[in-house]
Image: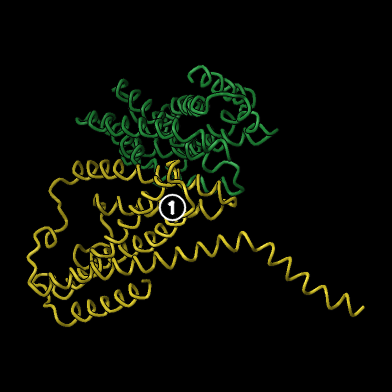
Amino acid sequence: MFRDAVLVAGKDLKVEYRSRVGAQQVLPFALVVLVIFAFTLDANHKLLQTAAAGLYWVAVLFAGVLTVQRSFALEVADGLRDGLRLSGLDPAGIFLGKAAAVAGQLAVLEIFLAGGIAVLYSASLHGVVLLVLSAVLATVGLAAAGTVYGIVAAGLGVRETLLPLLLLPVVAPVLLAASKVWAITLQSGPGAWGWMRILVIFAVVYLAAGVLAFGPLLEES
Amino acid sequence: MRRLLGIGSAAGLTLTAILGLFVTPPDRVMGTLVRLLYVHPSVAWVAYLAFGVTALACICYLWPRTRAPFWDRLAVSSAEIGVVFCALTLATGSIWGRPTWGVWWVWDARLTTTALLLALFIGYLALRRVTVDPGARARRSAVAGLVAFADVPIVHMSVVWWNTLHQPATVLRPSLASPTLSGSMAWTLLLSFLSFTLLYGWLLMHRYQNSVLEARLEDEGMEIALAERWAEAVPSGVGR
């Protein structure tokens, strides 16, 4: 299962590396989102500093939706999905691989966005251990849930409009918990660790759901 | 059976309306607003019941031994009713909240969870609508419905924490938290629960019947259309 996952993740990341869609479209989009938030909040430095954590995770979430779309749009061309189905790879492995590729791209994006809020919103990034740990957990949760819903919506003509509707309410707890951890940490407050539990539970539930459900869904999609 | 349910729920709802509007006393604090008590909790109960039935039906569909079109149809029928009643719950809650709390909406844990629940099942219905192949639709939506339902406890836990961390002292249900209901109020409330549950059963049976007919139309639609075209073609062919 894990060997298959590494293969699939390697394939997806290689395609992304060569096409550079993530680097040239998704990343600039996420940065533009940060800039636009500043417009709506009247470029008020104090307000932006307070809201930095939440705005950061909203930007990550939007970029995450695009990344998941992209991850399944890849399979449409040249009958790749049939290829994947006939390849004899373990469906659970395919799920983990695709989720890992999405998570990897999101992780790179998060590093850039963290720089973005440091520069644009003057957020001082301290408590790095907590920030990184919560970001890793949240990213795993987002990628797992995104990949589950990606395959549910795969092959439909209306995938682009349906996926955000399905995905955003589901990942609401991740958004809430991750922005709480970040907000607390950036303002050096107590109680950030409690929120980690939600991130852990969410990641575990959706990884398990994906491992169990991906086989039947891949078969008929 | 269906007619019995329909008549029962209609009679129950009428009686609830009469009792709720004219017989029961107004509340000392909330005045006549308290009459929303005979609608809002029972509507919310039906919404939760309907989503619970959908989740159970999704499980039964995914379980290989019990897989049958019955469960798929039951799931969608119940989900549609649930969405309507969930929207009604939020609407009646808002109507009650505006004069009582002074705002249409508060980010209370229960309200937030219910709103997200509505969004999750709107997504579920949207997914069903755009998937064409019946087998794929049943399987995908069963997974989506179940995964969405699994999200509800996590959402609830997170918003409960969110709220207790934000505003620890506000428990916004002073009157409902300590229910001192007089006799006629308690009976009317009970009756409203019963009649709305009957209404749910009645709607569910009708909606289920609809999906059976829909499936038949999908199966036989092509043949019917062909037969109609043939019937049109024959006279003109003879006439020439």
Q: Check the rendered structure and report the hue given to chain A.
A: green
Horizontal arrangement in the rendering, residue A74 relative to residue A176 (left or right): right
- In percent of width and height, residue A40 lies at 42, 47
Query: B38 and A39: which one is in front?
Result: B38
Q: Residue furthest front?
A: B65
Measured from the top left, where is residue A16 in percent x and y?
59, 26
Residue at image mark 1: B71
Tell me if A155 is positioned left or right of B1 in this view. Answer: right
At which x and y percent is residue A196? 28, 30
Image: B154 above or below A161: above
Which quadrant holds the C terminus of chain A? top right
Q: In which quarter of the view is residue B223 placed?
A: bottom right
Neighbours of disc 1 within 10 Å: few (<14), some (14-19), many (20+):
many
Give the residue type at disc 1: Trp
The image shows residue B36 at horizontal and vertical percentages of 22, 70
At x 20% / y 71%, what residue is drawn?
B191
Quarter of the image where one finds residue B178: bottom left
Determine the secondary structure under disc 1: helix
Query: Which of the 4 image quadrants contains residue A168?
Result: top left
- Name the residue at 63% across, 33% down: A81
**Nearer to the camera, A10 or A129:** A10
A151 horizontally vs B43: left or right? right
Chain under label 1?
B
For this orientation, the residue located farthest to the top is A3
Question: At x 24% / y 78%, what residue is drawn?
Answer: B17
Give the colour chain B carries in the figure: yellow
Q: Measuring 55% from the left and 35% from the top, which residue is drawn there?
A: A218
